[in-house]
């Protein structure tokens, strides 16, 4: 099963390597990882998607908590989480295909961010599943390049994962 | 205005550091220069790895943080095994390494190595200092992190320009505030209540003590608790000595190299209290089975240990001393005598039969017993790794002394530098390193340190001209096909000791050995005793 873990860390050099090193040496598999600063510039949030069972996730939480620059670890509950991935997709768009691609883009809620005589580049921010769908739809036209960020996620509702004391 | 190097020394002084073990080099020269004006005693080891081991021995006996210092590059990489050994055994160390100029970092200049990166998997935390004004904060944090919670090694890598830079203000008064580091010491009261209920309703309880009992300084509490409740104690290798060997409730060491009584006790128990023990694979091979038969109470300061190796029914995260104090207060109960009698009876029945001595050799097991009984009650025995470790672990009688060994990493060559550190921490106590002829040769350069410091470390070599434990594995699992285990070519150890000016003697029978022990213990000078042991003696 896949789990999404939200980790607040001190925004220092070397913290990412401490976290990623922990995953590799303990044999935990990272599906995706995204890092960025939070509302407090001294704190970054990592969103890590891992493959494993309950034992593995409990171990990951505990081992992450042992790292000194880690402030807070929370495994997000599926269904009570908003999770998004951002993609840029460069599609081949020769005359006659351009209209089709633009229609798919509109239908799926993607934005066209770059146009050339032979390509269109789409920007798409949505769930991993809908991103897959868009890719499937675009594949027949010839996808030239794709870049996807790791998943970022927040809890639904008014709850906040705070950077206060680690429990 | 003071220099970074001077600030580093001042930080050590503020932390009450009296001894540091090290080996200088170019990138740490400013620090060594500043050390001249300090009262901190520097012990020059003969290879960097042993600086970490000696600091470990020092920390374990002094109860404080051990400090070691080396230069950049090879000086730092040589430390790695020592840092990893300390990490596995949860020993508090502050490890200081010099580093090349910070503007040259990443260019592969002479003696540059990314030591914080290399040591990352086995340090509790590490720092690469970029600004001299951060030195006081970093040192204060490092000592705090090393010593609190689950102790462990913390590395501080200091580029030479940072050591030379000037800082305008030295303020060591600011309290440590690390947002992501607040170890919980007070056990959860509800969990403690549950544990006490479980104890009260058990019929066959056993307490398994690990190295955490020493880290928490909780030996007295442990003794009081198990005596009050009549609970038999078994220990891991790291837990040897939490109770005197001769204590009626001490059933000995468990595990693949432990004793029958201890292993049967945990097998038959209906309640297992794990106290500061992580029960690694050598202690309990199938932890799932133990947990399926018995209720498990696991007390540890490190939440990540609970449920890692053995499933726990009642986890208690906290300082063992505080938790045991609660237990003592609230437990009004005694384990049934039938259970204790059964366990004790096995201890007597299975106490190993002495092997008849072989002509021309010392019998190691009775030798260990004699040695430990002849030493003072508070003596410190440092066991190396190999057959000598198992003989020492199972046969040394420890009273209120200590048994120090590399339990987690199993580092050969640990005992001699560990003994150096232990002796410097407690000059008034007897300290004896027990090693094999293999492990001795991994650390024999430290005879020079012993000489230079003029400390009365006693060294026993159990000499069987084999890497005995590996040979035993090859006998058992590889059809007696021996490869790479014969130690021919070893020097005459007595002459070697003589070359260092250390009194030495070689013995080939237990009677001879006994008189040599008396001679060895007659004074507080360094002494090397070579015991010729038959290659055929087994570990168990």
Image: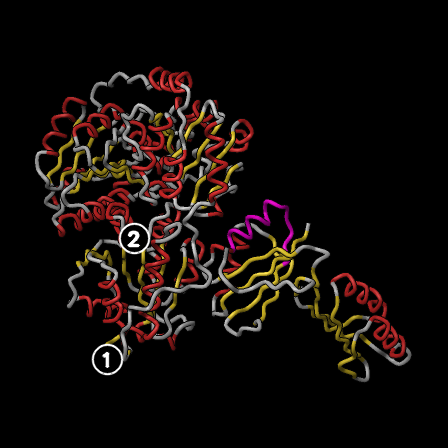
Query: Which numbered marker is on residue B1?
Result: 1
Locate residue A79, reporting x and y percent. 73, 56
Q: Residue B320 is drawn in which quadrant? A: top left
Q: Which residue appears at 50% of the width and 70% of the height?
A: A11
Task: Give the extent of the magenta segment.
Answer: A49-64
* Nearer the observer, B92 or B332: B332
Separation of residues labelled 2 and 1 (CA atoms): 32 Å
Q: Quick check: can you spot residue B372?
A: yes
Locate residue A36, reporting x and y percent. 58, 70
Query: Which numbered marker is on residue A90?
Result: none
Q: Residue B109 is drawn in which quadrant? A: bottom left
Residue A30, compared with residue B493, is above or below; it is: below
Q: Which residue is mark 2?
A: B52
Element under disc 1: loop
Element under disc 2: helix
Q: Quick check: can you spot residue B478?
A: no
* Nearer the observer, B85 or A116: B85
The quarter of the rendered structure image containing the N terminus of chain B is: bottom left
* Nearer the observer, B156 or B539: B156
Chain at tag 1: B
């Amino acid at each position: 099963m896949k789990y999404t873990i939200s980790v607040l860390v001190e925004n220092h050099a070397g913290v990412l390597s401490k976290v990623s090193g922990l995953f590799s040496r303990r044999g935990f598999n990272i599906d995706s990882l995204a890092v960025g600063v939070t509302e407090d510039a001294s704190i970054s949030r990592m969103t890590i998607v891992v493959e494993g069972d309950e034992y593995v996730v409990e171990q990951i939480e505990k081992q992450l908590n042992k790292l000194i620059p880690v402030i807070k670890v929370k495994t997000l509950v599926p269904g009570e989480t908003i999770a998004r991935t951002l993609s840029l997709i460069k599609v081949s768009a020769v005359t006659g295909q351009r209209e089709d691609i633009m229609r798919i883009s509109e239908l799926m809620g993607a934005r066209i961010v770059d146009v050339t005589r032979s390509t269109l580049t789409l920007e798409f921010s949505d769930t991993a599943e809908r991103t897959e769908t868009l890719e499937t739809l675009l594949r027949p036209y010839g996808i030239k390049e794709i870049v996807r960020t790791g998943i970022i996620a927040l809890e639904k509702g008014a709850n906040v994962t705070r950077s206060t004391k680690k429990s | 205005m003071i220099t970074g190097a001077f600030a580093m020394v001042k930080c050590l002084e503020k932390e009450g550091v009296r001894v540091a073990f090290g080996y200088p080099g170019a990138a740490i020269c400013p620090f060594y220069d500043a050390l001249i004006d300090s009262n901190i005693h520097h012990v020059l080891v003969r290879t960097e790895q042993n600086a970490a081991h000696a600091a470990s021995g020092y920390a374990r006996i002094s109860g404080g943080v051990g400090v070691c210092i080396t230069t950049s590059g090879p000086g730092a990489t040589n430390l790695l095994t020592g840092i990893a050994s300390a990490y596995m055994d949860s020993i508090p160390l502050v490890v200081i390494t010099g580093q090349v100029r910070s503007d040259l970092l990443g260019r592969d200049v002479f003696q540059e190595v990314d030591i914080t990166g290399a040591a990352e998997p086995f340090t509790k935390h590490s720092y690469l200092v970029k600004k001299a004004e951060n030195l006081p904060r970093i040192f204060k944090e490092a000592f705090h992190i090393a010593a609190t919670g689950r102790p462990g090694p913390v590395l501080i890598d200091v580029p030479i320009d940072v050591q030379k830079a000037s800082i305008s203000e030295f303020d060591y008064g600011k309290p440590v505030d690390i947002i992501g580091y607040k170890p919980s010491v007070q056990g959860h009261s509800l969990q403690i209540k549950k544990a006490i209920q479980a104890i009260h309703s058990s019929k066959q309880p056993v307490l398994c003590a690990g190295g955490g009992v020493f880290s928490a300084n909780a030996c007295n509490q442990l003794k009081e608790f198990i005596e009050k409740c009549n609970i038999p104690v078994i220990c891991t290798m790291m837990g040897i000595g939490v109770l005197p060997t001769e204590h009626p409730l001490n059933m000995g060491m468990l595990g693949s190299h432990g004793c029958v009584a201890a292993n049967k006790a945990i097998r038959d128990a209906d309640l297992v209290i794990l106290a500061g023990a992580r029960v690694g694979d050598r202690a309990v091979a199938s932890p799932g089975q133990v947990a399926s038969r018995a209720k498990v109470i696991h007390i540890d300061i490190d939440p990540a240990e609970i449920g890692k190796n053995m499933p726990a029914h009642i986890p208690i995260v906290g300082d063992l001393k505080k938790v045991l104090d609660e237990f003592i207060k609230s437990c009004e109960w005694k384990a049934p005598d039938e259970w204790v009698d059964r366990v004790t009876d096995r201890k007597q029945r299975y106490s190993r039969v002495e092997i008849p001595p072989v002509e021309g050799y010392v019998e190691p097991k009775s030798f260990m017993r004699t040695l430990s009984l002849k030493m003072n009650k508070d003596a410190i025995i440092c066991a190396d790794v190999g057959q000598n470790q198992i003989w020492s672990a199972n046969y040394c009688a420890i009273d209120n002394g200590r048994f120090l060994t590399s339990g987690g990493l199993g580092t050969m060559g640990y005992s001699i530098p560990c003994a150096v550190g232990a002796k410097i921490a407690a000059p008034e106590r007897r300290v004896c390193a027990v090693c094999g002829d293999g492990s001795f040769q991994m650390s024999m350069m430290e005879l020079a340190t012993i000489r230079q410091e003029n400390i009365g470390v006693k060294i026993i070599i159990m000499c069987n001209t084999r890497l005995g434990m590996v040979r035993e594995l090859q006998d058992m699992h590889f059809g007696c096909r021996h490869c790479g285990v014969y130690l021919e070519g070893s020097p005459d150890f007595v002459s070697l000791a003589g070359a260092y000016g250390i009194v030495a003697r070689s013995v080939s029978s237990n009677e001879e050995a006994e008189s040599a022990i008396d001679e060895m213990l007659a004074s507080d000078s360094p002494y090397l005793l070579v015991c010729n042991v038959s290659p055929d003696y087994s570990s168990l």
